[in-house]
Amino acid sequence: MTLKQLTYFLEIAKMKNFTKAAANLYISQSALSKTVKAMESELGVNLIDRTVNHFKLTPEGEILYQRGLISLKKINEELDSLYDSLGIEQGQISVGIPPVIGTAYFTSIIHKFREMYPGVDLKITEAGANTIKKWVLDGEVDAGVVIQPVSGEDFSITPIITAENVLLVNKSHPLAQYDEVGFKMLKNERFISLNKTFMLYDQIRSICLVSGFEPNIVCESSQWDFIAEMVSLDQGVAILPKPILRRFNSDKIKLVSLKDPKFSWNIAIIMKKDKYVSKIIKSFIELSKTECSAAK
């Protein structure tokens, strides 16, 4: 079994779908199927249960998936260490980034990093911060960009930037007369929010509960621009990080500062505590800090 075969199998098991895995790996579905059959023939076991209508690994396939993730992680870390020792700027790093943060800061960071390190394969995967934390712990990504607070027990944490979260209201809304409002004033409002995979959802709900009420969340979305558009149509209020709203121009929305408590957007890059930190990953983190500070 080759390293390429193992990588292909792990992607199939992760996606639970041959079509999606083939697209992610930039190969044909038929080539991917042939790879799995070749592995099964060499190992003398079935890795995928083909007697059921949905994707399912056999017990042997589950073992290969779980142990394969650990093995591939160790191999990649050894390669990173080798490249560092030789001063070679090659290899691969994978980073999980929430769409909201990616929109605000990381498009330019990704572009500059790829220009600086053309020999490095930078793989970016988007998801909410809660999902990214799990990926980092499971070794599915090398690093993750998240919203603090994050427990330091499992992660090494590098703060990147602090910005302001603001209230979005339609200009016809009664709260539009204020430049700053306290959370208690939002008790009877209809909230349009990022969904539960985002830490911002948990933070907003937590602050509202401390302020004495359960927020009335009437709509959840993974798309910040959809949320802003809904507010422009006066369908509710929303709380979003101020930096991303530079990309949304509407004369129907007013941004209102929040108080009692002040509500900051604290971005950090996290890695699993026991992970080897290569020079390339360190460079990505340093570039992120520099670019985010410049864009503040």
Image (spheres, rainbow, N blue to C red):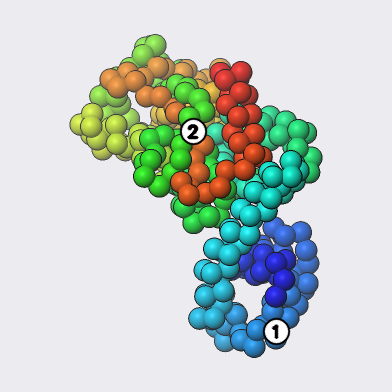
Q: In the structure shown, which secondary structural element does the residue marked by tag 1 occupy?
A: helix
In the picture as drawn, the residue positioned furthest to the left comes out as 212
Provide residue 174's location: percent of width, then percent of height: 36, 18
Asked if 82 appears above or below 258 in the picture, the reply is below
Asked if 293 appears above or below 195 in the picture, the reply is above
The mark that comes first in sequence, 2 or 1, is 1
The residue that disc 1 covers is 42
Q: Residues within 10 Å of mark 1 (few under 14, many from 20)?
A: few
Q: Is residue 34 left or right of residue 204?
A: right
Q: Is residue 131 left or right of residue 69?
A: left
Instruction: Judge whether residue 79 can be spotted in this image.
Output: yes
Task: Identify which residue, 225 or 145, lies in the foreground.
Answer: 145
Given the image, on which type of amino acid does mark 2 rest?
Thr
| Residue pictured at 61% horizontal, 85% vertical | 46
Given the image, on which type of amino acid does mark 1 rest?
Glu
Locate the C terminus and report the quarter of the image it occupies: top right
- Report the Cα–Cα distance between label 2 and label 1: 44 Å
Provide residue 279's location: percent of width, then percent of height: 64, 39
Q: Residues within 10 Å of mark 2 (few under 14, many from 20)?
A: some
Q: Is residue 256 left or right of residue 282?
A: left
The residue that disc 2 covers is 158
